[in-house]
Image: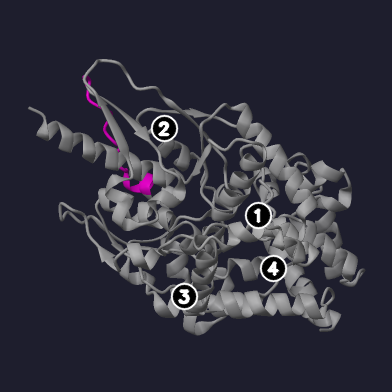
Amino acid sequence: MSMGKSGLRSLDYSILQQCMHCGMCLPVCPTYAETRRERHSPRGRIALLRAIADGELAMNRAIAEEMNYCLGCLACTSACPAGVDYGTMVETARAEAEELRILATPKRDFIRWSTMRVLFTRPRLLRLVGRLLWLWQASGLQALSRRWRLTRLLPTRIRELEPLTPRICAKFSHQIIAPIERPRDGGVKHRVLVLTGCMQDLMFSEINRATVDVLLENGCEVHTPPAQFCCGSLHAHNGDHATAQLLARRQLDAIDPARYDAIISNAGGCGSHLRHYDRLLAGETAYSERAREWTRKLKDIHEWLVEIGFRRPAPCGEHRTFNIQFPTPHQTANAEVRGSMLEVGCSRSGDRGRSAPVTYHESCHLCHGQKVSAQPRAILRALPGVELRECAEATWCCGSAGIYNITQPRTATWLQERKVAHLRATGAEIVALANPGCHLQVANGLRAAGCVSTRVVHPIVLLAEAYAAERSTRSDVGQAP
């Protein structure tokens, strides 16, 4: 691709002109905080991209690597007084670097093709791989290979990543959620569609089940298509613009947004990308109108619940105290045990149950990308027996950032340790967060720090458990003499 066809040079120039070089982004940029180098700041990167657009520089390896060193956390966009659209600039620069094949190697090309172009564009293949990984884990072979140190036979980089292998659920979303579910009392106020995601479907299907349960409790008829396509966020953030567009088209072919009051996302990173289908497909006549409707209907689960006025779970009765023992995430993955996932202890004394201290880590793309920050806190504060403790740097990236902890392990580990230190300082027993990548990064960091008893959980799972405890309370009271 010649410079005349450069993605940056064809970008609306006003986007590049927005930056006033005021430096308000510097204190919130993790990579600048680590190195204190101007080129590792949003302001420095924008200067490089503007020079490319002006024809003063050509895209080269150093600039391409700099764009990949950026987390894409969008904290700078929240701090920027001029409203700089930094995310569009970085994604455009990454796409240009990929088209020019500046960082291409046979190994890198194969990995990108096999994962982004093959695995994540075929939902059934992704579930098959997930099932094989589950068998590897459930059979004990993974534990044996670690005990016998067979992982030493793996290539160095894979050996380093193997301990981060996520646990796969025994059952995926389509196995524990019916395609259409309605409230128990039959009162339907809204019709919504729930997006189950890719990795969330495999690793955290209990979050999708909890999302459906909470929506049912709030008068929603819930549609959850069994087979769903990847949203394309992984592709868009890593410079594969064409595949991101392809997946957006497939999503719109499969789901008509006009049929629903809202399309619900419960993963911060996915939701941020899903909100921009209108921009992604703006130039395509066959899809642009539906993409605009999709963007208008796309809601984060916390945002939607606050918007419709979610029902606060009832506290325990004055003379009956219920102490909820929260399960680990994978204990709730099986729909057959959902009815007993809460161990409710009843006391007829007037003693109040101890409040569980909870802290909240904000997914970057939920708070900075989607501007959803107050709503999850409103839900956490509505939970009976929960004490919300604010965490320092709650809006800072944990180091996951999509695949950043794989491509930039040193900086990702530094951010992980920084995040874990702040979480531990709160003394919270539960860490609430709303993105699968954050979930894995924070859980792994806490485990490495020896905090094995700290629970990491989605806020919606806590709300679903509170509703379940409320039903159990009513049932127990009804059976009391």
Above-or-below relation of 105 to 295: below
- Three-letter amino acid code at the position of disc 2: Arg
**Residue 378: x, y in percent?**
42, 37
Q: Which residue is at a point 65% across and 43% down the rendered structure image? A: 445
Instruction: Say whether residue 303 is visible.
Output: no
Residue for badge 1: 147
Question: How far is mark 3 from mark 1, CA to CA?
Answer: 43 Å
Q: Residue furthest top?
A: 350
Residue for badge 4: 238
Foreground tag (1 vs 4): 1
SS type, badge 3: helix
Q: Earlier in the sequence, mark 1 or mark 4?
A: 1
Residue for badge 3: 251
Q: Quadrant of the C terminus?
A: top left
Foreground tag (3 vs 1): 1
**Residue 106: x, y in percent?**
80, 81
In the rendered structure, the answer to whether residue 190 lies left or right of residue 249 reads: left
Above-or-below relation of 428 to 79: above
- Three-letter amino acid code at the position of disc 4: Asn
In the rendered structure, the answer to whether residue 278 lies left or right of residue 93 reads: left
Residue for badge 2: 381
Magenta stretch? 305-319
Disc 3 and disc 1 in contact, CB within 8 angstroms: no
